[in-house]
Amino acid sequence: MIAKVAIDFGHSELSGDTLAALQEFYNDRDSQDKRFQRLKLAAESNSQQVLSMDMFTEDWNASQFWYNDETAMILAKEILDEATADMCIAVVSAPGAFIQIKNLLVSGVHP
């Protein structure tokens, strides 16, 4: 039989500065989430809006691959060069490459 042990850590409370920092973090996260939702709607509606990496933030809880603009452009061109009209392209965990693909398509550089 396993004995149950109760541990009383007492009453814990965050300081005012810590609570303010936590609230700022949540506000930033909520604001970024709203911007991303607008970006998602624009992407799904085939918007002609030019995108930038400023619309994304790094999420340390997600596996993401962050490329500089030059590398992202190379990846985007390679993907589009190999794509056919009947293909669907999924860009997973690579926001830089996604942005460059969308911008190439919007600019008309890649049909």
Image (spheres, rainbow, N blue to C red):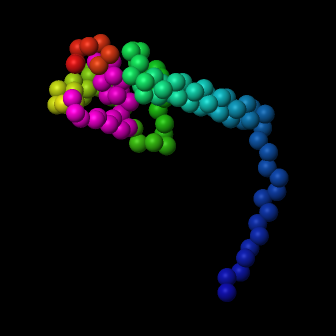
Which span is picked out in magenta? 85-104
User: Is residue 77 within the magenta segment?
Assistant: no
What residue occupies the far front of the structure in this picture? 86
Closest to the observer: 72 or 33?
A: 33
Which image quarter: residue 5? bottom right
Q: Would you say residue 52 is visible in this rendering?
A: no
Q: Would you say residue 87 is visible in this rendering?
A: yes
Which image quarter: residue 53? top left
Q: Tell me which residue sits at (26%, 26%) in the image.
A: 76
Q: Residue 88, percent across and down?
A: 28, 35
Closest to the observer: 101 or 24?
A: 101
Figure label count:
0
Q: Residue 49, percent across and down?
A: 41, 15
The quarter of the image holding the C terminus is: top left
Q: Tell me which residue sits at (49%, 36%) in the image.
A: 59
Q: Residue 28, percent across and down?
A: 61, 28
Relative horizontal placement of residue 73, taking residue 15 as reference (left or right): left
Relative horizontal placement of residue 42, taking residue 96 as reference (left or right): right
The quarter of the image holding the N terminus is: bottom right
What residue occupies the far bottom of the structure in this picture? 1
Q: Residue 64, percent across and down?
A: 39, 38
Relative horizontal placement of residue 110, taking residue 60 as reference (left or right): left
Q: Tell me which residue sits at (79%, 49%) in the image.
A: 12
What residue occupies the far left of the structure in this picture? 82
Whether 52 is drawn above or below 78: the answer is above
Closest to the observer: 99 or 72?
A: 99
Whether 9 is drawn above or below 83: the answer is below
Relative horizontal placement of residue 44, taking residue 87 as reference (left or right): right
